[in-house]
Image (spheres, coloured by chain):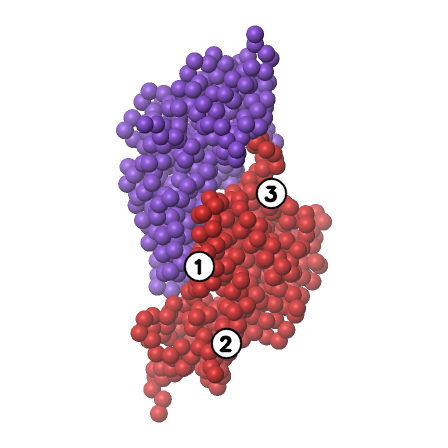
Chain colours: A purple, B red
Amino acid sequence: MMSVTSPVKDFVERVTAVLGVTEAPLALHEPAFSGNELAYVRECLDTGWVSTAGKFVDEFESRLAELSGARHAIAVVNGTAGLHAALHVSGVLAGDEVLVPTVSFVATANAVSQCGAVPHFVDCAPDTYGMSPAALAEHLRQVAEPAGGGFRNRHTGRRLAAIVPMHVFGHPVDIEPLLDLAARYRMPVVEDAAEALGARIGDRSAGTFGVAGVLSFNGNKIITTGGGGAVLTNDADVARRLKHLTTTAKAAHRWDFVHDEVAFNYRMPNLNAALGCAQLERLPEILRRKKGLADAYAHAFADAPDFRFVDEVRGRSSNNWLNAIELSASMSGRRDEFLEAAREAGYQCRPVWRLLHRLKPYAACPRMGLSVAESLEQRIINLPSSPQLFREVA
Amino acid sequence: MMSVTSPVKDFVERVTAVLGVTEAPLALHEPAFSGNELAYVRECLDTGWVSTAGKFVDEFESRLAELSGARHAIAVVNGTAGLHAALHVSGVLAGDEVLVPTVSFVATANAVSQCGAVPHFVDCAPDTYGMSPAALAEHLRQVAEPAGGGFRNRHTGRRLAAIVPMHVFGHPVDIEPLLDLAARYRMPVVEDAAEALGARIGDRSAGTFGVAGVLSFNGNKIITTGGGGAVLTNDADVARRLKHLTTTAKAAHRWDFVHDEVAFNYRMPNLNAALGCAQLERLPEILRRKKGLADAYAHAFADAPDFRFVDEVRGRSSNNWLNAIELSASMSGRRDEFLEAAREAGYQCRPVWRLLHRLKPYAACPRMGLSVAESLEQRIINLPSSPQLFREVA
């Protein structure tokens, strides 16, 4: 006999099978500092190098580049700043339109706004929620018309200036067809890889396919610098421009203050980079644990018709940043019951972000039909995903 | 018998009288971490609270407010971000003009640009180099005409949207007549108090006179958070708006992501605030030492016709952030000889910033006659000013 609450109970039991019974609430994602974090931070204090110059910033950038296979990495104060700078350097201007997913954190749209441009929202793929190449292709066929060497939105008259795919929850987006579309419509791709450090498409890191890719090291990310971000790029000119523009465009001189363009103060402080260097040393172990935890969730939800574990797809390795369960369509409208019950049991779950086109500041922006995202919005539940939650099995 | 190099030699000797002979170069301004810095940073790591939430951010804000006498303080990633947010909240819009001093670090103009507005440059007073109320009054009489409830520049047609005085080197600007002008021309005053933590006008802190005042805690400032800044305000609505806009305008909710306006990711991380809390505890001692060092410079340069020690003026107490010597007009064109000689002797001196209206990105901006600043630019030399350089005398 099924009671009306049984799917909720079933859900909580499956989560409990992975995480165990808990007294203290388990956070959605927490950092851990079990390596050289304190040692490196102490070194900053001992040497006095805590600010916008210092060896840890350079080292953090080198290690990020090496680890991701990008030719260059530029450390910045946070992912939003990185995305703003990357869009700016990619040529996005005031009055342009930028194609962004409606399934994303608000930073994706805010960075577009900070360029004076307007987000134009794209629907998501049903598998891992990244920007849908098929939907975008069909949409561009309908709305894009050639103008001035590029393309513009025939309805608004605004130039279509860039495509910003986002690797949702650390699952790499289907990047190749998006790159093809970008080439066809003469737009740069800037990857919002805020959640995707360590994720790979084939043998290449997420964030290294576009003109630039932007990482975040906020406290809830796979590694943290307190607050911070970085821009990856393989283009030496883009790297030089990014470094220059994120450091007030100051020309090198022993004492003179010459700034040769309007620029930003987005440089990551050495103190935060010190934390980042220590965290990066532990990234392989963090990724291993996160994979173990994701495997455990996948197993626990394997035979559940009401629930789909949002798994990586073939050829695109997730970093398993934030695990997610998709409720079946029959559960639509009941999402908050699941969230309440999980919280009551001590598991800090959360829904996906409110779709960007449904936020007040972006409600009037151009968009395609967004039915996939709209259906999913009421059915996604993120699960506690800290690497510390992985329980080794013998 | 005077040789042609004697003023340079004289200069170096006077600096040496204050700082002593040195083997290792003495930096212009270095932080010191002799208090609870490591303990507080370690607490962040131990508790996992390093990012955009945590007790140190709140505590840092409370202590800043208390110490400055402002009703509210909002901690941000750096002074530029604070200035951008403060101008935005003060109503500066794209296409406006903002009156800023030409004697300032480039951040003052960049923050205006980030609002989509245009800096309009104002000359400085000859005493402590802050924006000249007399010059601004005369200029506004000539260029301002009433329009739409406020005033616009009759030459460009742009609205005059704000006045941004800056407290140069920690010397408070002559704020009262600037506030009067702002009231007469219906513009808010936003104080660029990046260098002025601890400086006072009468019994009130610099940074608390305008609608908002912006502090910086960059590594070279009187206290540091690695990178960081804060906005002071006495207006509860302005404070609420600033807090909201610097934290992605997220509405409070247990799990939902509702962001109700286009906003910024400017929040200071807890890790940096931890450093700031420890530094603030030491501020009285830092100010005492900086005053001692400034007194020593004042004494060493007291009887020198070629040199003027840039001293605070009556009623406006400097925090003595960066000591400066003004060369006499007869030394114009020889500034770099002084800088070279000082550097050779191990004293890291520097000139004032290149005047903002002479920087390429701002060369075409509106301005008044800037003859005082232009004369001074070639004659200002900043001296090593770290509080550690003060030598106690019995």
* Residue farthest to the top, as pictured: A1
Given residues A135 and A26, the one toward you in this image is A26
The spot of residue B88 in percent (x, y) is 59, 47
Whether pointer 1 and pointer 3 mark residues with C-beta atoms closer than 8 Å, the reply is no
Name the amino acid, label 3. His
**Where on the picture, by quarter, is residue A207?**
top left
Quarter of the image for residue A316 reads top left
The residue positioned farthest toward the bottom in the image shown:
B1
Distance in Å between CA atoms under marks 3 and 2: 41 Å
Name the subunit of mark 2. B
- According to the image, label 3 marks what residue? B244
Of the residues under marks 2 and 1, which one precedes in the sequence? 1
Query: Label 2 neighbourhood size at 10 Å, few (<14), some (14-19), many (20+)?
Result: some
Q: Which residue is mark 1?
A: B219
For label 2, the SS is: helix
Q: Residue at x 50, y 57 (%)?
A: B276
Badge number at residue B292: 2
